[in-house]
Amino acid sequence: MRNGQGFVAALDQSGGSTPKALASYGIPKDQYDSEEEMFDLVHAMRTRIISSPVFTSKHILAAILFEQTMDRTIEGLYTGDYLWEKKGIVPILKVDKGLAEEAKGVQLMKPITDLDSTLDRAVERKMFGTKMRSVIKSADPEGIKANVEQQFDYGKKIAATGLVPILEPEIDIKSPDKAESESLMKAEILKHLDNLSENETIMLKLSIPDKDGFYNELIEHPMVMRVVALSGGYSREEAVKLLERNPGLIASFSRALVEGLNAHQSDEEFNAMLSKSIEEIYKASIS
């Protein structure tokens, strides 16, 4: 995870984002009647992606999973076991419970009330690490400080279990003061990084910065295993172009990865589309 060439596949759409993900995949809401059916369909989509012959460790370092996906199986193996044993891809678990209402220009995470039991299950299911997302909407110093602090507070609890936390204080790409938010956020992150102990290694998942190379200081920090970039609403074409301008930053794309995939494609069409997407994202991640 620290030194390999490749990128992170984000396959962790939660209950709130699943209908949109399925609609993009060619399965509208009128094709399922319950939440259970919805989650069965999205697991079938993820299974098709993960089990595809083009989804391999040649290009993909890790995959981020939704909690239900961790507890489901692919070809008789728990998803994390299938990823590692059959594909050589590191499994990571999304642990946040969604976003709180916006205040002071940010959306903090809702309290993760079952974190201890979730982490116990993550260890049992052989996850390598975790991921949790909050959002920065505007350059409010107080809000950004609270956002980064919350990420590190949870991150330290996660690291204490032996799991590697991915902290994701996403900056909204449509924010009018995005560059200023990036400066404030980076300064806050660096403060926390310098106070970590040697067994508290983390990863960061960040929006692609306005200024090329802006996160080099984070990428090179000894307490940071990897800095990965979210696509954040950009198309794959846009995200790949921006990523290429930031050496050392690797992709952790969700929508940009599955863009163009459809439930009604033949296996040949599906695998060709997925292969094209993986190749483009991989090349940008090793530039």
Image: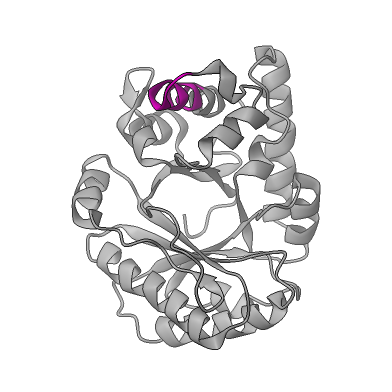
User: Closest to the observer: 111 or 154?
Assistant: 111
As displayed, is residue 184 above or below residue 106? below
Q: Position of residue 281 (x, y in %)?
A: 70, 46
User: Closest to the observer: 138 or 210?
Assistant: 138
Q: Residue at x 65, y 35 (%)?
A: 258
Residue 35 on the magenta span: yes
Q: Position of residue 209 (x, y in %)?
A: 70, 70
Task: Provide the residue span drawn in magenta.
Answer: 33-44
Q: Residue at x 40, y 70 (%)?
A: 151
Q: Position of residue 277 (x, y in %)?
A: 71, 37
Residue 94 on the magenta span: no
Give the quadrant of residue 202: bottom left
As displayed, is residue 111 above or below residue 80? below
Q: Residue at x 75, y 33 (%)?
A: 276
Q: Left of 22 or right of it: where is 115?
A: left
Give the quadrant of residue 214: bottom right
Residue 150 in view in this figure: yes
User: Closest to the observer: 230 or 220?
Assistant: 230
The image quadrant where one finds the C terminus is bottom right
Image coloring type: one colour
Q: Left of 56 or right of it: where is 147?
A: left
Give the quadrant of residue 280: top right
Residue 80 in view in this figure: no
Q: Position of residue 261 (x, y in %)?
A: 68, 27
By secondary structure, the bulk of the magenta-drawn segment is best described as: helix
